[in-house]
Amino acid sequence: MAIIERPAGDSLTYADADAAVTATSSYGYLRRPVETEGWRSWAFTVDHKKIGIMYGVSAMFFFVLGGLEAGLIRLQLAGPEGTILSADKYNQMFTMHATTMVFLFVMPMAAAFANYFIPLQVGARDVAFPRLNALSFWVFIFGALFLNSSWILGGGADGGWFMYAPNSDVPFSPSNGVDFWALGLQITGIASLVGAINLIVTVLNMRAPGMSLMKMPIFTWMAFVVQFLLLFAIPVITVALFLLMFQRSYDATFFSVEEGADPLLWQHLFWIFGHPEVYILVLPSFGIISEVLPVFSKKPLFGYPFVVFSGAAIGFVGWGVWAHHMFASGLGPVSVAVFSVATMAIAVPTGVKIINWTLTMWGGKLQFTTAMLFAVGLIVQFTIGGLSGVTHSVAPSDTQQTDTYYIVAHFHYVIFGGAVLGLFSGLYYWWPKMFGKCLNEKWGKWNFWVMIIGMNLTFGPMHIVGLQGQPRRMYQWTENRAGEGPFNIATWNLVATIGTFVLAIGTLLFFINALVIHRKQPIAPLDPWDARSLEWLTTSPPKPHNFDRTPTVHALDEVFHRKYEDIGEGDEHEYVQRSTLEELVEEEERNGDAHIHLPAPSYWPIVLAFALPVMAYGVIYTTWLIVLGAAIAIAAMFGWALEPADAEESDFDPPAAGGETSKELANV
Amino acid sequence: MDVDAPTTPEVEVVHDDVDAPAGALTDAAHDEHHDHPSEGRYIAIALMLAVVTAAEVAASYIDLGWAFLPALLGMMAFKFIVVVREFMHLKLDNRVFSWLFYTGLILALFVYLAALLTFRFFEG
Amino acid sequence: MSDVVKETVQDAVEIVKDHAEDVHDHDVHAGDHGHDDHAGGHHTSLGLSNTKLAMWLFLGSECLLFGGLISTYMLYRNRHSEDVGPDQLWDIPFTSASSFVLLMSSLTMVLAVAAAGRKDDRNTKLWMIVTAVLGGLFLSGQVYEFTTFYREGLGYTESLFASSFYTLTGFHGVHVAVGIIMLIATMGMVAKNKISGDKAETVEMVGLYWHFVDVVWIIIFTLVYLIPA
């Protein structure tokens, strides 16, 4: 039996009273948090799994919020001369819809999976810096709440999600919305940057013995590439946001054209970040479906190294194409030609991935579970979005499409059809791992089909209205401009609006499935899908220490190779099942490591994170709040620095005589 | 926000197989600490950097013609590389650190030079 | 053509495999000889310190941050009024002196790191103090320079040149100030033996940050001050 030690606290009672200890106050005035239940166990946790779940729950909350914003936009455009929203509110709505979906839903949802599954997939007990991990989450959540607090403090940002300056300067956007936006994204940017450093170190340094880079599960690989993109892209937007903040709050002149400023400066800085950002959104989902497709095709991923290298290639080339967002800005023919060709080139590694996925399914014993349906849905829908993307890479064609609904159609096919479907695939696939029960498959299939119909009804017609010339961000259209014939924009705008509500029902089905139906679901077996990768080699949900015994890895698809034996000869493979996952996990438990010290919870991450919005409100309203926020931050940093990362030895359950402890307190 | 890195090395997961006896500092990463150059070498390097800085300043006062810009940029790059390799120990440390840092540096050079090019910054 | 592609891919696969083997060697190594400086030592796949990896990643990221600010300055450096531009403002001897001070602080920092590596607390503290003082001297120089420029008519909102100059050098100055706080805090913790974990490594991390701030100034000094617009 594994013997796990963990910090003891008042809440624990020991069979052996002599062994009871209380947490020492290792930094003088505050005891370490030791709660294992209740809100404190979440607020001060450093467990990557709890943090992952908190990321997921918050992301889903913002998904609903962003969806409501989208619903209002579509209602406004359903008929001619919509009156649901004023022009001003409409601007705020589409700006905050995009900002919420990109920064507060897709990115944190991907962070949720990365946090939860990277340590499990590489065989680690936690991330490299658990306290920094908690800091990332709290900084994200405080930044997100700060950003959305603008709704009740004078209105949201209204410059569109790329917030072109000088249009976002005070004369054109006098409310505080843009200030909240610029500061809020700086804060969430800190969260992403800290998270990226943490996860890169985790992948580089915390792998289980034998887990070489080319034996890592593919989701970990794709998430790893994404962390590098974040690491290098976040500072670029930070510069842009910083300049904008100084422009608006302290009258700097970076974007004042009347002073001779160059309006392209913002565009370059934004898109140098913005294009890698596109891959930041979509690569985690590519990773997820690269896990899901092999499992439900009963075949290994076709061309694993190609998927890895094409992922890395996408990440790399993604840095050289940003100006294709600026073809209409008068860059000059040479720049346009160069960026146009580079953009066409990036379709190649993406195509490689599509081929790999297709060939993974080819000849496989396909099982269309909900997770698989979402994965296949991604391939189809993302390919449609990819193809309209190639039409943008051709600069003359792009010049016609710029700022029309055609662009809106394109990026919703790649972001919803790519990133979001992949995330849902991941939810259905990993749900039993995270919560011990599968989501209901029947509801899941309804969820999938309603969603996929809804998305095509919503975003498909946008191709038509876009090519008919309907500008994006136009808050009303009139009967006179609707046109006639099968491609009149009146019909298709109405269809898109209806589609949005179908999509909303599809999403609602997910929430019913997850929150209501899920309760009645039976406990799932340990291996509901006959899975292949390392995160399944433990209980569901995993114990706080993840693995009873640190696994030693021998192969890509380690769990598959532990379950199955190859009895084929030479190049002929024939696999026979030798053991079940239940047996394997039981064996791990029997041979568990002794003395596993888990990182101790801490108050400081949440305190430090709290200081940031305080400072940000200070920038907008009054300087003394900056001072107060800075004081909190410095106090928190000192508390953090003086607190040992591990609890004191005396905080732990002492080993019994002979070095072996007989207490089975662990496995909370 | 560089809060954690410099002051608290985090030691999170303790495996029982590394309970080495006190003073067993024989791990590869640690050997490098003892290979660090002598203080004399550091002082010599600092003197050299000071001399190059003096040369830079001098160059900005005299007319070097076309050679001015390449000379100054060359001296700047030289100082940068020397500090990074010698004082920050990239020369002796594991290659991984060099890769991580130079990736950021080269990426920064690439994207910002490309952006300045599109502004026709270098055309006069 | 396809052969070339195939070979390239094979090469790439081999490189990663080689690397993987390196990693494995390290594994064994780190597993065999844990060190006890940490609260029990830990095992890492690369045999490298987590904190140091994190620091270098952070510095790699900082390159993009300062790159953006420097590019903004380069773009806007000529956009100022006739009579308050670099030609009127720059005081090269003064800035050269303060650059020299910061450069020398890199020397004292590396001496502190070396002393910490020898477990020589006394010299570690001494050199860190000297480094912090030199950093403070540099910052005072910057404050003096800013006030002088301001008096000569270069307000922050005066011109594009002014905004981008103050933002770039001010941002660097904030980095120096953070470095000084880190130096003093670390020194206090060394003195009181409060550092949890490897003391030498902690000093080394402060050192890496400090040197990075110095190399950024090397670039700023040349590009902003010495090369005329």
Image (cartoon, rainbow, N blue to C red):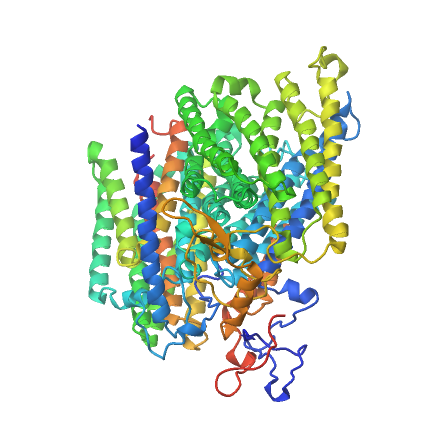
Q: Nearer the viewer, residue A440 or A151?
A: A440
Horizontal relation, residue A123 to residue B47: left or right: right
Horizontal relation, residue A564 to residue C139: left or right: right
Tell me residue A200's x, y (percent).
45, 53
Height in image: C180 above or below A411?
below
Horizontal relation, residue A89 to residue B94: left or right: right
Q: Residue at x 34, y 29 (%)?
A: B122
Height in image: A266 above or below C69?
above
Height in image: A642 above or below C168?
below
Q: Which quarter of the rendered picture does the C terminus of chain C lie within? A: top left
Q: Quadrant of residue C180?
A: bottom left
Residue placed furthest toward the right = A83
Tell me residue A23's x, y (percent).
59, 78
Q: Quadrant of residue A150?
A: top right
Tell me residue C209's x, y (percent).
39, 57
Horizontal relation, residue B26 to residue A442: left or right: left
Q: Nearer the viewer, residue C94 or B38?
A: B38
Residue A441: tell me if it is visible: yes
Count of numbered labels shown in the rendering: 0
Q: Residue at x 68, y 77 (%)?
A: A11
Tell me residue C169's x, y (percent).
42, 47
Residue placed furthest toward the top = A485
Q: Residue at x 69, y 58 (%)?
A: A523
Residue A622: tell me if it is visible: no
Q: Nearer the viewer, residue A171 or A403?
A: A403
Q: Which quarter of the rendered picture does the N terminus of chain C lie within? A: top left
